[in-house]
Image: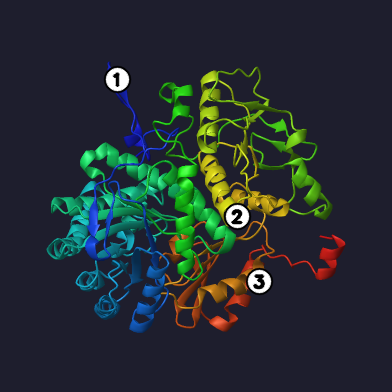
Amino acid sequence: MNSRSFLRPARSRRETVTVRYCESPFFYKRRRTREIIIGDPARGGVVIGGDHPVVKQSMLTCDTMDTAESVRQTLELVAVGCQIIRITAPTVKDAANLENIVRELRAQNCFVPIVADIHFKPDAAMEAVKWVEVVRVNPGNYADKKKFAVKEYTDAEYQAELKRLEEAFTPLVLEAIKLKRCLRIGTNHGSLSDRIMNRYGDTPLGMVESALEFARICRRHDFHNFKFSMKSSNPKVMIECYRLLVARLDELGPDWNYPIHLGVTEAGEGEDGRIKSAIGIGSLLCDGLGDTIRVSLTEDSPREIEVCADLLAQIPLLTIAENASALQRFNASTLQPFNDPFHFERRETPEIDLSEQARCGGEQLVRVVVSRATWNKVAPKIRPKDDVKPEAVYEDLNVAEIDPTQDFDINCDTQLVTVKDGVPLPAITAFRLLAAKLKRLGRKNPILLKDCLAFEPVPLEPKIALLRAAVVIGSLLADGIGDAILIRGESGAGQSLRLAYNILQAAGCRSFKTDYVACPSCGRTLFNLQTVTARIKARTEHLKGVKIAIMGCIVNGPGEMADADFGYVGGAPGKINLYVGKTPIKFNIPEGEAVERLVDLIREHGKWVEPESNEQKLAGVV
């Protein structure tokens, strides 16, 4: 099956209808979804969808059998604005203890909805649904076992598998109807069943079709109180998944307008985790998609809610409403799409000289440009072989500054272009409009992206500047637009330069440092993720172009690590398994030895280099 076959235009002699994932890429209009009720809204429950605000979620990090700690963490999350809380239930025993947790919370007048996170155990789901408002099931794990086996299914065999799936899932649906519960059908990139993998591959379309199999079972029983999620640790994959999902739902009919939950899974910690989440979640929110969100950080859970709130607050500032007056200056409806939104492909441009130090466009890396003021501050500190360094100065460039709301003409493809400062449009809209108009003119000019088109009267807080730049630049890079980038919203010179490189790495455009895929902690975690992540980073963060996955358990481990070079995965209490890609190589390594054994594994595969000594750093020697 062609992975985008359902997206082909439906043609007739009179009209062409193209499936879309949002109303328009040029203005904001929130996708209208059906409302689903979680708990009692009058007593702390929530309504998701419709015109209701986007809901903020997080997850407990403790053992589900520790009732007191589960209650304490829940109350702590509620105090900082968390509206839905997820708790893992890996076994029937854990699921049964949800009764005690919920009872104690209600006794303390806390009625926040609780979600039970279920993966491998249908029996655990049947127990959990008795006590909590929502049960999250992962279709790839719920009724299927992954053996990474290659098998060709006949149509009859495939239908037999679907019948087996229905028999396994239907009891939970019927119980959810009886108890007025909600379900979350949540697929994860890398944890698809062998059946889906063999028919669709480890693809966004496979994730969508896996979720739809479960949704069809719900609908056969007239059960509609569910939502979808499509999570990946790669923001570009995650964006493609959600776009495909919404387009597919739109094609299926207006009554398939179910809410969706947004998240970049295993985003990591610190700036990297925030940037990945802002790219994935923020770009979709700007397109009007998303009814609930979770920012998954390898940090204490309350910090996730702060980032959620900050991210949501930026969306009105980074978008233009459907009826905004600036839209009267151009007719977006006459423009052809500037890209295929369901399949990432970098916009085709010629290769040109950007500066004496770098070229851009074509197959070149996306380059980093700085202002003259930033150059003057950072240049004296740059060593000849540093990876993080300016590659051009904006004021020195031969760049055409264009107002895309007006008619313009470019007489050659080798002219670098950007959007003119002061254009009365948000940056995402302006650069998409520029790309669309260049396409209409038949031009392939390289584009310099800016994170903002006007300077704030008061410098932004660094955390806000980071989120805004990541949403704007990340969204456009995920669209395939951009050959160089300029960050100006961050007022600190060194910080803005580092932020530019971090965004490019998170978007998969460059690799100048070690990349980490690190899951947030939960009750399934078999070691202290924050401590271990810090230990692994201390030993490996000097490596360039190496991707390391740090997984607390096996749930999403092998699959989610498919594009990682090496994996460090909790296999049992105090024991670690090491992977190369998704293949386990070493088993049951004592935790105290595991980091050094990971280093040995990296060395065995020829990707280890010794870190610089302090003397080398001071001398500028590499």
**Going from the N terminus, do you reach mark 1 or mark 2 first?**
1
User: Judging from the image, what secondary structure is the residue with disc 3 in?
Assistant: helix
Name the residue beneath numbered marker 1.
Answer: 15
**Going from the N terminus, do you reach mark 3 or mark 2 first?**
2
Name the residue beneath numbered marker 2.
Answer: 461
**Going from the N terminus, do you reach mark 1 or mark 3 first?**
1
Seen in the picture, residue 15 relative to 552 is either above or below; the reply is: above
> Residue at 51% of width from left, 21% of height from top?
440
> Foreground mark, 3 or 2?
2
Seen in the picture, residue 80 relative to 66 is either above or below; the reply is: above
User: Does 207 sit left or right of 498 as displayed?
Assistant: left
Task: Residue 564: tell me if it is visible.
Answer: no
Residue 531: image x %, image y %? 56, 76
| Three-letter code, disc 1 | Glu
User: Judging from the image, what secondary structure is the residue with disc 1 in?
Assistant: loop
Q: Residue 523 is drawn in which quadrant?
A: bottom left
Name the residue nearer the viewer: 462 or 131. Answer: 462
Name the residue beneath numbered marker 3.
Answer: 538
Name the residue nearer the viewer: 34 or 169. Answer: 34
Query: Which residue extends farthest front?
Result: 457
Seen in the picture, residue 154 relative to 22 is either above or below; the reply is: below
> Residue at 38% of width from left, 40% of height from top?
3
C-alpha distance separating marks 3 and 2: 28 Å
Residue 538: image x %, image y %? 66, 71
**Quadrant position of the C terminus in the picture:** bottom right
The circle drawn on residue 564 is: none
| Three-letter code, disc 3 | Ala
User: Does 420 sit left or right of 94 as displayed?
Assistant: right
Q: Residues within 10 Å of mark 2 (few under 14, many from 20)?
A: few
